[in-house]
Amino acid sequence: MLTSGLVLGLSISKFNGGDALFQLAMFIILLFLLKKYAFGPLMGIMTQREEHVASEINAAEASRLEASKYLEEQRELLKQSRVEATQLIENAKQQGETQREDIIIQARTEAERLKESAKREIVQEKEKAVVALREQVASLSVLIASKVIEKELSEADQEKLINHYIQEAGEER
Amino acid sequence: MNHGAPTQDFLGLTFNLSNVLMITVASVIVFIIATLGSRKLAMKPTGMQNFMEWVMDFIKNMINSSMDWKTGGRFQLLGMTLIMYLFVSNMLGLPFAITYDHVLWWKSPTADPVVTLTLAVLVLSLAHYYGIQMKGFKGYLKAYKNPMTLIEEFSNTLTLGLRLYGNIFAGEVLLGLLAGTLAMSGIWGALGAVIPTLVWQGYSIFVGAIQSFIFVTLTMVYLSHKVSSDH
């Protein structure tokens, strides 16, 4: 009974074409209003965010590439400086070696020179001493001679005397 | 239960004033929700903006599943408006129905076949329009080499509108029977009507959501049939 009443209630109503027009108009108005005041700005901000994210990703990618480039550069520099350092140490070692050699050679020549000069001095001193001895011997001879003349020494005594003095002189040296 | 409709003739057209009222109410609610959702737009979304963006992505996925985004992007606005309007319309008839002087005023606007068929015709007209615009008149006519397509067009329009109408109207009829008739039939009837009414209201929310989803999905499918060139 109820259902038939419902169906009847529907069937007796006329075709409401005005509703169709009203619905159409309202929907189109709603569409444009929403586009203008709600979804348009929303879509705008969504695309803006998309672009922002994309640009951020690009920037991150670029900075990552740059960082890796710098890292490579730094690594290269480090390697280079390491090589340089070893080279420097090697150089210093070599230099030290040559310096050592030089110093030794110098010391050796110095020593040689000193020895030479000492020898020379010795020889000179000796010569000087001999000269002095000779002078002394001469003066002694003169003295002896004068004494002999005074005492009339025998030849043997004289020789003995001379030898004695020479020996004395030799011991003093 | 035998409610009449507040019809009024104006300029040779018949207006159902309750439909006019409910269409306006639904449109205003949708507009308010959408405007609130996009009032304070920020790059970092908060609150309602999150919800609106979720709906946006939802529609975007729907469109993407039936056509590529390059051609389908222009229908996003249509899809957004349709799904929000239909969902709100379907929900309007659930909490109560208002009758005044044996005339039904408050109901879902989608519980009227004229309203739903209007939307269906609008969608299909748009499909034809974009079909001609994008593929040219010759490309558009190619689809009609098989005359069965003509019938398909007709039935598509009819089923798209009537499916929605049938679901919502049936829901409202059952709600009316439960709340309006069974609950009025005495104390035991009122007690017995509580649980089925609750269950049916919950189910109707589900049906309303699903029907609006289906309507928009089919809209996108029909549009893609007309628009995409591989068809």
Image: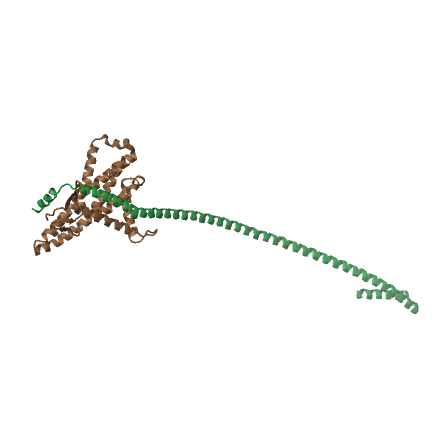
Chain colours: A green, B brown
Q: Is residue B208 visible?
A: no
* Closest to the observer, A95 or B82: B82
Q: Horizontal and vertical percent for residue B213? A: 23, 45
Picture residue at 45% right of the left edge, 48% below the top? A66
Picture residue at 70% right of the left edge, 57% below the top? A110
Q: How many numbered discs? A: 0
* Closest to the observer, A70 or B6: B6
Q: Is residue A154 left or right of residue B180?
A: right
Q: Residue pushed farthest front? A: B11
Q: Is residue A110 visible?
A: yes
Q: Is residue A59 left or right of residue B180?
A: right
Q: Is residue B76 left or right of residue A63?
A: left
Q: Residue pushed farthest top? A: B145
* Closest to the observer, B141 or A156: B141
B187 to B109, vertically: above or below: below
Picture residue at 23% right of the left edge, 38% below the top? B124
Q: Horizontal and vertical percent for residue B145? A: 23, 30
Locate residue A165: give its quadrant: bottom right
* Closest to the observer, A129 or A34: A34
Q: Name the quarter where the C terminus of chain B is drawn.
A: top left
Q: Horizontal and vertical percent for residue B185? A: 7, 53
Q: Residue pushed farthest bottom? A: A151
B129 to A68, vertically: above or below: above
Q: Horizontal and vertical percent for residue B2? A: 10, 47
